[in-house]
Amino acid sequence: MDALTALHNRVSTGLLTDPAPNEQQRRNIFRAALRAADHGCLRPWRFLLIEGEARERLGEIFLRAAEGAGDGMDEAQRARTLAMPLRAPLIVVAVTRLQEHPKVPHLEQRMSTAAAVQAMLTAAYAEGVGAYWRTGALAYNPIVAKELGLAENERIDGFLYCGTPVKPPRPAPQLAVEEYFFNWDAS
């Protein structure tokens, strides 16, 4: 698939199953992340790969974090939380290592990680791999960060779920470019 076709047609694919991306697909997806815009060439991103039984352990971490947040949970909510990581055979946790830099604020470093995730989403689509990006309260929970071994200067900027689509991806919405791009009148 050519780059413009992937960029113009990529959609998130929510229903995923085994198998996870193969080694060649992973290599292409992961290499795409490394081309993200990166002011100062800080390479502020790193990625944790979670698959197999490690997904069940992540579910336990999610449950402890949700319960620790003080949210009263019934059994159905507990079961849903435990099962969250089982939605895909591979989860890529996008982590930003925040660095002090005179020209590159932390926000730009996190935006670079976001660009890396977007590049992986597009590469996954081009490879025929289903993928979607999730954040939410658990991405920002200190229990999750600690259990995943993040350093004090690291932040989770998303969970990229990857696998084989259960059904073909839906068509991308055809948005009108002129509704979002405007000439600026400097007068």
Image: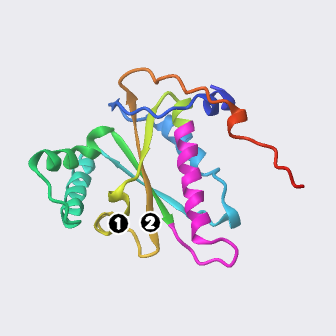
* Residue 108 x %, y %: 62, 64
Is residue 98 within the magenta segment?
yes
Of the 4 image quadrants, the one containing the C terminus is bottom right
For residue 128, above or below residue 95: above
Query: Mark 1 and 2 residues: CB-CB less than 8 Å, in contact?
Result: yes
> What residue appears at the point 13 percent right and 44 percent down from the top-left corner?
76
> What residue appears at the point 33 percent right and 38 percent down from the top-left corner?
88
Instruction: Residue 120: tell me if it is visible.
Output: yes
Find numbered disc 1 in the image and state the secondary structure of the residue it sits on: helix
Image quadrant where residue 65 sits:
bottom left
Amino acid carrying label 1: it is Ala
Between the residue at mark 1 and the residue at mark 2, the CA separation in whole angstroms equals: 7 Å
* Residue 99 x %, y %: 57, 74
Amino acid carrying label 2: it is Arg
Q: Kindly identify which residue carries mark 2.
A: 155
Which segment did they paint magenta?
Answer: 97-122
Of the 4 image quadrants, the one containing the N terminus is top right
Which mark identifies residue 145?
Answer: 1
For residue 105, above or below residue 132: below
Depth order, front residue of 113/107: 107
Which mark identifies residue 62?
Answer: none
